[in-house]
């Protein structure tokens, strides 16, 4: 299935895009600088995911489709939560939000890595 191959080929790119977004957010927080928050459909990850993966999602094997749906959910939740942070004016209660962001980020990366492992299993 061509769509599945494309998904497997791009997993590294999705991981990199998420890490870059998180790095930019953390830098803005650390420096107290404004951050241009984006929703889950406007960031580079989301735009490509919506263009390349969502159209083929229902054609994927159920195990992969379930992972993709969970990636989609967590990715959008990450963006929703991150929008609650004013990087120029951190408050003590933001610590809880930052912890939640770290947990969501870790969960998202784990799911993407699971796709990588499945790719290697299928290719060997």
Image: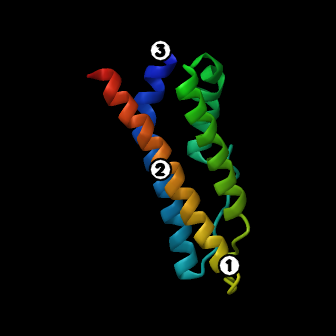
Which quarter of the figure has residue 10? top left
Q: CA distance from mark 3 to mark 1?
A: 43 Å
76 sits left or right of 4 in the view:
right
Does residue 91 lie above or below 4 as drawn? Answer: below
Q: Which mark is residue 2?
A: 3
For marks 2 and 1 on the same chain, the one whose residue lies earlier in the sequence: 1
**Circle 1 crowding by C-alpha within 10 Å: few under 14, some 14–19, many from 20:** some
Q: Which mark is residue 109?
A: 2
Q: Is residue 38 visible?
A: no
Seen at 66% across and 63% down, the residue is: 36
Q: SS of the residue at dot 1? A: helix
**Circle 2 crowding by C-alpha within 10 Å: few under 14, some 14–19, many from 20:** some
Q: SS of the residue at dot 2? A: helix
For marks 2 and 3 on the same chain, the one whose residue lies earlier in the sequence: 3
The residue pinned by badge 1 equals 94
For marks 3 and 1 on the same chain, the one whose residue lies earlier in the sequence: 3
């Amino acid at each position: 299935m061509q769509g599945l191959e494309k998904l497997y080929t791009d997993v590294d790119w999705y991981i990199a895009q998420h890490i870059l977004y998180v790095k930019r957010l953390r830098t803005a927080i650390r420096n107290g600088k404004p951050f241009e928050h984006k929703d889950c459909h406007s960031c580079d990850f989301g735009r490509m995911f919506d263009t390349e993966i969502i159209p083929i999602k229902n054609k994927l094997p159920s195990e992969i489709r379930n992972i993709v749906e969970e990636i989609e959910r967590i990715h959008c939740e990450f963006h929703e939560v991150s929008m609650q942070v004013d990087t120029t004016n951190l408050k003590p209660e933001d610590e809880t939000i930052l912890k939640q962001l770290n947990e969501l980020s870790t969960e998202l990366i784990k799911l993407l890595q699971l796709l990588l492992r499945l790719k290697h299993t299928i290719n060997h």
